[in-house]
Amino acid sequence: MKTVAVYSTKGGVGKTTTAVNLAWEASQDFRVLLWDLDPQGAATFLLQVKPKLKGGVDALIGGKTGAAKAIRSTRYERLDVLPADASYRDLDLVFDHNKNSVERIAKLLETISSDYDVVILDCPPGSSLVAENALHAAELIVVPLVPSPLSLRSLEQVTEFVSESASAPQVVGFLSMVDRRKTLHRAAVRDLPRSSSTVTNIVVPSSVVIERMGTERAPVGVYAPRTEAAHAYSELWVRVQSSIKAKQRKHRH
Ligand SMILES: Nc1ncnc2c1ncn2[C@@H]1O[C@H](COP(=O)(O)OP(=O)(O)O)[C@@H](O)[C@H]1O
Ligand SMILES: [Mg+2]
């Protein structure tokens, strides 16, 4: 089982959008679990799953509710969701009350590791205990970057935060919400992948096709498969896979 966290210290940069589309792309070939870690429950909503967790996240993390019991299937084959509900607002406190507070997500995932090939974690923004848990569990962190002079700074923040994690996951950044009519955005697309080896040249455009996810409540690849947006997410999944493989090779040598 491979675990990928979609994370940024910032909100509203496209984390959930990326998590849902990556999970759906991965489910074309693999058994995938998307874990919605944000109390807003946006990923849960977008995949048309009920935002309900019996006993709340406290019981899940404490081991009273087995993960398999809390997981819901989606309308897509091989794609399941571990939904978030309002109880996720207290998740930081729940972790704080448990021992090995940074390893709880990883430990819970171990219990279902034979059921899934890929786990995607949709993280809330910020540097919380939730984020630390996600970074600890993941071997790869995907970071959406909105083109701006500050985006490299936000990537550095993530890299710094990640480097404090014992598991030292790999970081893959990509530009999201790119509007090519804007000079600043075109410059970011040209310069960022060159100035930082952690930024790929994959570009997700700012697009009404992606905005429509909220009304379609489906991944872009389902209702608009032949668009630039859908292709970008498909490419991103391919890149994530090859990064994981490259990391494995490095570890073997
Ligand atoms: N590439 C894009 N083009 C247009 N709108 C986007 C794009 N990516 C995300 N959005 C919209 O921006 C808002 C924030 O995206 P979201 O994925 O929820 O961000 P986060 O999870 O980082 O808070 C949502 O309304 C989403 O539909
Ligand atoms: Mg989100």
Image (cartoon, rainbow, N blue to C red):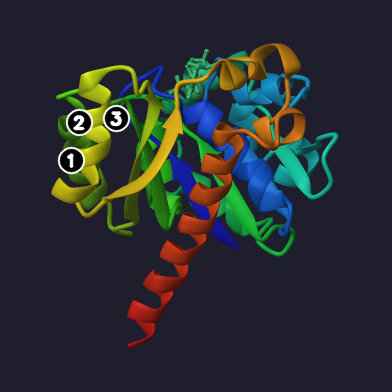
Q: In the image, 32: left or right of 139?
A: right
Q: Quadrant of the C terminus?
A: bottom left
Work out whether mark 3 precedes mark 1 in sequence or the reverse, and give the earlier one: 3
Q: SS of the residue at dot 3?
A: loop
- Note whether 145 is above or below 33 in the view shown: above
Q: Identify which residue, 247 or 138, lies in the foreground.
A: 247
Query: Dividing the picture into quarters, in which one does residue 66 lie?
Result: top right
Q: Could you tell me the amino acid type at mark 3?
A: Ser
Query: Dividing the picture into quarters, in which one does residue 154 lie?
Result: top left
- Note whether 151 is above or below 226 in the view shown: above
State yes or no: discs 3 and 1 in contact (Cβ < 8 Å).
Answer: no
Q: In the image, 199: left or right of 22?
A: left
Can you give x and y, in whole percent of width and height, for residue 242 in the image?
Answer: 47, 65
Q: Identify which residue, 122 or 154, lies in the foreground.
A: 154
Circle 3 Cα neighbour tier, 10 Å, few/some/many (<14 / 14–19 / ≥20): some
Task: Identify residue for label 1.
Answer: 191
Q: SS of the residue at dot 2?
A: helix
Q: Which mark is residue 187?
A: 2
Residue positioned 38% across, 70% down in the render: 247
Work out whether mark 3 precedes mark 2 in sequence or the reverse, and give the earlier one: 3
Q: Identify which residue, 115 or 23, lies in the foreground.
A: 23
Q: Which mark is residue 127?
A: 3
Q: Could you tell me the amino acid type at mark 2?
A: Ala
Query: Dividing the picture into quarters, in which one does residue 80 lie?
Result: top right
* Cα distance between the residues tagged 3 and 1: 27 Å
Can you give x and y, in whole percent of width and height, for residue 4 in the image?
Answer: 49, 50
Residue positioned 51% across, 20% down in the render: 207
Q: In the image, 73: left or right of 182?
A: right
